[in-house]
Every structure is written in structure tokens, then in C-alpha cells.
Image (cartoon, rainbow, N blue to C red):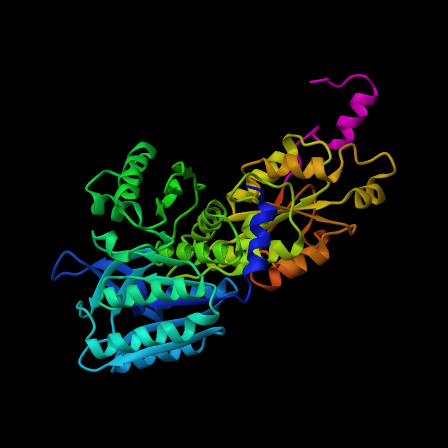
Amino acid sequence: MARASLIDLISAAAGKRIVCVGDVMLDRFVYGEVSRISPEAPVPIMRRTREASMPGGAGNVARNLASLGLSTALIGVVGDDPEGRELAALLGNIPDVETDLIAMRGRPTTLKTRFVAGSQQLLRVDAEEVADIDKVTEAELVASIHDVAADAALIILSDYAKGAVTDAVIKAALDAGEAFGIPVIADPKGRDFKRYGAVDLIKPNGHELAHAFGMPADSDQDVAAALKAAMQVLPAKAVVVTRAAKGMSFATHGGEITHRSGKAREVYDVSGAGDTSIAALALGLAGGGTLAQAVDLAIAASGIAVGKSGTATVSAAELRSALEMGLDHGGVSHIPLETALSQVAAWRDAGLTVGFTNGCFDILHPGHLKVLEEAKARCGRLIVGLNSDASVRRLKGPTRPVNDAESRARVLSGLTAVDAVVVFDEETPAALIEALQPDLLVKGGDYTLDKIVGADVVLARGGTVHIVPTVNGQSTTAAIARVQAGTGSDT
């Protein structure tokens, strides 16, 4: 799948209206530090340092839709309680999200409280009532769906099995979809997937698919068999199963079963990754993409989400950046500064430190590798600033570079130590360092701190500067001289 076409879908879907109906809840995260075990019982003692709350469930789907550049109408049920009012206020602060939250007396707002130490979730406490909403509230939900769906591009049913997505609500969504000619997609719960009717797409995860059909869903072969069984009995037009690090698989009536692999990523928190994936599926379909393209967008988006802590969202800029960097389908040689800035923000959001080094890297040699490897060992992600061809000519003379910028960038981007390459046209990387604001600056050679371009910028923000000593006898100029003298190797 060409990256350019996926990127185009993000722009094509921008501003489209999505109706999201389902179980809204409040996610609360209590963060702290653990340094000892309780003398009262073999449990850790956590010293609370901070607390954060955000919309969860269908509310998090709405957050992700808005973050991806879509306009969202969220319909759900809360309790007539402080948590419900807090949830409404949080959602009211999100641009491009309109809410119709029906307050149901006698029913608490679903509250999930997670206790987190470092990157480890210690405990989750749920306060909720799991039962179908009453008929009066149900009728209000049904009426609201018909009111807001007329100018929508798609309807999402976000079912967390808390009672908002009743049979009548499902029928209302399907009726609206048929009346206005728009797709309806469902994120299901429970074993009875038939209850969602002829939705255009149903998106269980691997565990949910296995549970619903009593079949394993681990290997590609297992998933293919379970999808085949699903398509034989479900009225849904397509089934997409999310499989965590293994990617996604999907099937349609009369079509082949397709597996899309994911990329290995560092996982910080899986909270809300399913909400991100269904929002990205909606993005792809609303933008006019095929099911395969929507799945590819969902894989890329959920891969970004699991690299963040908490119930995270993924922005259109982050998704575009990931696609431009080739994190979903093959690599690219270098990225523009705008993409690099977006990626740096995402890395920092995941708690990663960002390192930077620069050079011409005309003919890669062991000295270069030492600098790159030492730099990567000291940071979470490493960006390499690469002199453009014109910049190299100004610095090294008219016979250089030997290899053009595209070739040099391709070699660098293929190294495991390098996470991104940015080409700059100036003689020094001063402006690039000022823009990126790295946490670590690494330079190879016999420099002193006061002679390293950008050192002042990095040190001013509390970062560090590291100098890697030159490897004797290793330089591009020397290598070229040896070749010209006929003493260099041709291998």
C-alpha cells in the first residue's frame, strides 16, 4: 500500500462528521512511586505524586476522532453525579466534539481508576453499574442518533458492555446508516456478535473473536479459521480483528482473508489502543479509502498509541509523520523538519530522550559508526542531521560529496542506531538544533565544548553534550585519498 495514498486519506477525511454512540466513562490515573513493600501485607506502598482524568470508552474514541482531524458527535449516558459532570466538562473542552450526554438518575458514571508506578500499572479499580439503560433513556439515545446522523459520514457503535448499546440503539444506528447512506461500524463486546446486525464492519480483538466463536485466535491460521466461521454466521459485511503486535486481519463476504502485519514497537501502555484503532478505521473509511487502507491506517495509529502512557490519543500530524517516516510499510531515507518536530513531540510524550548528531557522512566508516552507536546508547531516539550536497560542496570543495544526499541518507537510515535523518542546507546545524531542542548532542572529533555548534542550546535546556574521540586513521578524506593514490581497497 503506497504511503502517499494513506497520507492523502488523512487530508480527505479532515472535518468529516462522525457520530459515536456508546458507553462513555471516566478514566482516572493515579501516578506515584514505589520504594518499599507494606509491612501489613505483601503489597507495594505507592506514594502518590499526581493524578489525571480523561474521557474513556466511547469518550476516548471521540477524543481520538477529534485528534485525527474529524468532527465528532458523541452520544452516551452518564450518571447524575460529580463524575458525570467532570466527564462532561472534560469532553466540553475538546475542540470539534459535540456531546449529548444523557444523565440517568440512580445510575453512577462508570469510573475506572488506575494506579501507576513508573510505567507499571499496579491496580485498576472499577466503580460502575452494568445493566441496560432504562427505556426512557434509551428512547432519548435513539432520537439523538436520528437527529445528528443526517450530515454524518459514518456512525460508530462503541460497546463496552455497560448497558448503553442496547438492541434498540443498534437498530437506530443501522436505520440511520441506511437512511443516509453512511457506513456503521461496531466495536463489540460479549459473545453474541449477531446482535450488531448488518453493520458494515465489526472490530473485535483477538481475545474477543476467540471468545465469541470458541476457537483459538493466535496464529494466522487460527485467525483465518475463526474469521471464516464468523463470516458464515454474521450479517456484518466485514470483520476486522486487531491482534496487538501481530497487526490486524480482516475478512469480507466472498473475499479473501487478509493479514496485515504490525511493526515491533516499544509498548508503554495499551490503555485505549482499541479506541485509537477504531477511530483510525473510521478516518480511512470517511476519507474514501478501501478497507485495506483503513486497516493500514489503524495499524499505524495504534502503534503510536501504545508508545504513550495513559489513555492516549493520536493526532493527524503524528499519524502523517509515522507514515512519512515509513513506520508502517518500509523505510524512507530522510524526513522534512516539520515531520521531525512532530515525531520528537511524540517521542517525548512517550518519555523518550532525543539525541542529535550531525555530519556529511560521505563515505561511512568505523569512526562514523562509533559516533552513532555511542550516541544511541545514551538516548532513547537518535536524529542525524545530514549536510545537503550544496552544503558539503561549500565545506569540502567542488569534488565532494562522493555520494549524493539521498544515497547518504539511505545508508544512515538503514542503521539500527539511527531513528531519523534530517537533511539541512546550511554549513552548520545550528538552526536545526535550535528547532529540535535535543536532550543530547553528540559530536565526534577533538572538539572542546565551546567549539561545538549547538552545545549552548542543549545545555541551556538542561541537556548533555558528549564528545566521541576520533578513531585513528578513519576519515572520509583519508579514504578518498587512498583510493585516488591506488592504495585503497575496492571492496
- Compared across the picture, whether 24 is left or right of 402 comes to left
Residue 394 seen in the figure? yes
- Residue 38's image quarter? bottom left
Q: Hey, which residue is sitting farthest front in the picture?
A: 179
The quarter of the image holding the C terminus is top right
Establish if 396 lies above or below 308. Answer: above
Instruction: Locate residue 269, reporting x and y percent.
Output: 36, 54
x 61%, y 34%: residue: 369
Q: Which residues are magenta?
A: 469-491
Give the number of callouts. 0
Please name whichever residue, 461 or 433, is drawn nearer the observer in this view of the structure.
Answer: 433
Residue 188 spot, x, y in % from top left: 28, 56
Quadrant including the N terminus: top right
Q: Main secondary structure of the magenta part?
A: loop
Q: Whole-percent x and y of residue 140?
A: 29, 78
Q: Tell me what residue is drawn at x 14 percent, y 61 percent.
A: 39
Asked whether residue 439 appears in the rendered view, the answer is no
Hey, which quadrant is residue 430 in on the image? bottom right
Q: Is residue 263 above or below residue 53?
A: above
Relative to 180, 463 lies left or right: right
**In the foreground, 422 or 194:** 194
Res. 229 image quadrant:
top left
Q: Residue at x 27, y 41 (%)?
A: 232
- Image location of residue 37, percent across then percent down: 20, 58
User: Left of 296 or right of it: where is 451?
Assistant: right
Q: Is residue 488 magenta?
A: yes
| In the foreground, 152 or 295 | 152
Classify residue 118 as left or right of residue 383.
left
Inspect the magenta stretch and tell me whether residue 477 lies in it: yes
Residue at the right extreme?
398
Q: Nearer the viewer, residue 258 or 392?
A: 258
